[in-house]
Image (tube, grey):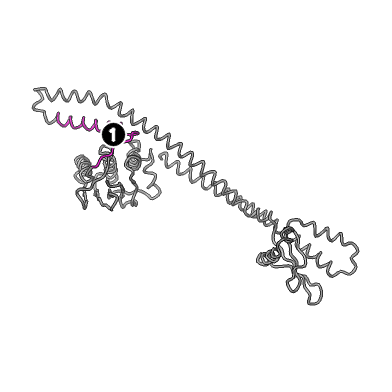
Amino acid sequence: MNIYERKYRWKIVLVLSALFIVAATLIYTDNLATKLAKEEKQKVAQIANVYHYIATATDITDYGFFVELIQANTTVPIISTDNEGHIVAHLNLDTAKVVADSTYLPRCLEDMKDYAEPIKLEISSGIYQYVYYKHSILYQQLLYYPYVQLLIIAAFLIVAYTLFNTARKSEQNRVWVGMAKETAHQLGTPISSLVAWVEYLEQSPEMEQKRSVVEEMGKDVQRLELIADRFSKVGSQPDLTEKNLITELEYSIDYIKRRSSKKVSFDFQYPNPNMQVKMNVILFNWVIENLLKNALDAIDGIGDIVIKVEEDTDHAIIDISDSGKGIPRSKQKTVFEPGYSTKKRGWGLGLTLAKRITESYHKGKIFVKQSAPGKGTTFRIILPKS
């Protein structure tokens, strides 16, 4: 299991933990809200009974006691009406608005009618009083509290993740640049020595019969120089020059084709042989070679590789397809992250470099266009045209 598979599992654990906390918070808050709603409804029923007793009793000597019972409710808004809907009493509403705005009480009454069924009190034969209510502000705040809390937590996590991700990418970039520069530096000394030895052998009369061997050695040395040059450019802003995309693709395809099995079929398709794109040739060829090598690994040396080029008004589009084992959907973004590899050997840096070179240096895009296990993979590169 590589580092990104472990990270994926940790993400699942964190998501499940977050969902558990959310569920527990909602259940607990809902339980509290239910209890509060029940208590408030009991208060309204108690006040309704007091209204009923006051309206029907004939021998009340101490009204103060009943007034205190009514005023003990300081949270639940209540409006009482007669048979014809005229407001006869109200409780726990904004007194200033009641005085200043004649429409305030009717609006509150309509709101309460939509909120809950009123308590119906029979005062005398055919005469009724209706007690309307709405739960307190505390109850409503309690209902919305977990959502507000979750929004705050989510905002905090997003900010924290963004800051962490930015810092991690910055650190990764520094590591990449340092590693690339050091690799180029380490390659430089033996390459210089090899160049000198090849020149010596070329001038030696004893090597005339082995001239072809020396020439091949020279090509390999040139290849090493190219690799060192590529690494030396990582971290620096490369110069982009206008080049024929098809010509450069042909060069990379031919290079890989000469070093692959005869059982691999290469098919290069393009509508326009003269498609101009601004690029850094050394780095761009590196991207194509990495994708082609990945395709060779995917088909295990037997199968088809198709390179198809299209264009629109502003972009050149390159699709590199193979008939290999494919990539699961869950891994199609992970493949570009450093360290991801399905091979036992290697650091899993090829596609990461390809993405950096394409997007950071050439202002293009690279992604998995389509893939499925057992049905092959298509990588797409989009580059701005000159």
Q: Disc 1 residue type?
A: Arg
Left or right: residue 37 compared with residue 347: right
Magenta stretch? Answer: 214-242
| Rendered image quadrant of residue 87 | bottom right
Q: Residue at x 39, y 44 (%)?
A: 334
Along the viewing direction, whichever of 62 and 243 lies nearer the viewer: 243
Q: Residue at x 80, y 66 (%)?
A: 51
Q: Residue at x 28, y 45 (%)?
A: 295
Q: Which residue is mark 1?
A: 230
Identify the residue at the far front of this view: 100
x and y percentages locating residue 161 in the rendered image: 49, 42
| Rendered image quadrant of residue 201 | top left
Location of residue 379 with respect to 204 vertically, above or below: below
Q: Residue at x 31, y 52 (%)?
A: 375
Question: Is any part of residue 14 visible from this angle?
Answer: yes
Left or right: residue 160 compared with residue 36: left
- Crowding at dot 1, Cα within 10 Å, few <14 / some 14-19 / many 20+, comes out as some
x and y percentages locating residue 278 in the rendered image: 27, 43
Q: Magenta includes 42?
A: no
**How many numbered marks does the figure carry?**
1
Identify the residue at the far bottom of this view: 126
Asked which secondary structure carries label 1, the reply is: helix
Q: Magenta includes 231?
A: yes
Left or right: residue 50 compared with residue 235: right
